[in-house]
Image (spheres, helix red, strand yellow):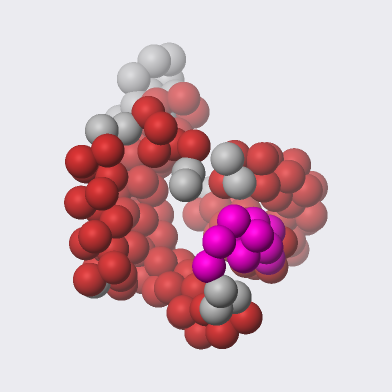
Amino acid sequence: KYLIFYFCNMDCVTTYLDILKEDPISVKVLTAFALMGLADFFAQIFKGTLGGRGASGFDVYRWLVMTIWACFPFALAQHWFSVRILDSFFESTGVQAFVFRTAFEQIVWGIIVNAIFIYYTACMNGKNFLKAVAHTRQYFWSLYLTSIVFWSA
């Protein structure tokens, strides 16, 4: 179903999908926490705040804010969007329904989540409202188009 699962142990994938069906909100929140936690950890490494020249150490506050933000507002909102919106529009199964559902999700949800994410990270880096909006306008399309390429795989 998803390209990423091709590289995984199928028993783990099957177990994950079974648990996801049983308790989707908890699984989405924990998955978001793990993925954002890892993403921000590596972002701090690549940015140079953890190790390397001029390192100021690991910013635990930033890491907590980023991971908690990913869990509650976005994991829960994505679940609501998936259950309330997507399930009501795309009730059928099959390849065609999957393709249309994925495209719709990427077009609508992708715009919302990427714009808010860019704005939020700009604010986390000390930008005021107007600078954060300008930052969002500057980087939105490159991030949005990249997310379409990766998430549809």
The residue lying furthest to the top in this view is: 53
Q: Residue at x 73, y 45 (%)?
A: 145
Residue 87 percent location from the top left of the image: 52, 78
> In the rendered view, does 59 fall on the left or right side of 126?
left
Q: Identify the residue at image location x=21%, y=62%.
A: 19
Residue sitting at the far front: 94
- Is residue 144 in view from this perspective? yes
User: In the rendered image of this protein, does residue 3 appear above or below residue 137?
Assistant: above
Point 30% across, 72% down: residue: 25
Q: Is residue 31 magenta?
A: no
Q: Which residues are magenta?
A: 93-105
Looking at the image, residue 137 lies above or below residue 49:
below
- In the rendered structure, the answer to whether residue 81 lies left or right of residue 7 reads right
Residue 109 x, y percent position in the rendering: 62, 66
Q: Where in the figure is residue 37, as x and y percent of width and height?
A: 32, 46
Task: Report the number of discs.
Answer: 0
Mark yes or no: residue 127 visible. Answer: no
* Quadrant where the C terminus is found in the figure: top right
- Main SS of the magenta part reads helix
Is residue 97 shown in magenta? yes
Residue 3 is left or right of residue 67, and the answer is right
Task: Using residue 96 as the reference point, say whether residue 25 is left or right of it.
Answer: left
Relative to the observer, which residue lies in front, 2 or 65?
A: 2
Residue at 27% x, 38% y: name it.
10
**Horizontal and vertical percent for residue 122?**
60, 52
Frontmost residue, 60 versus 97? 97
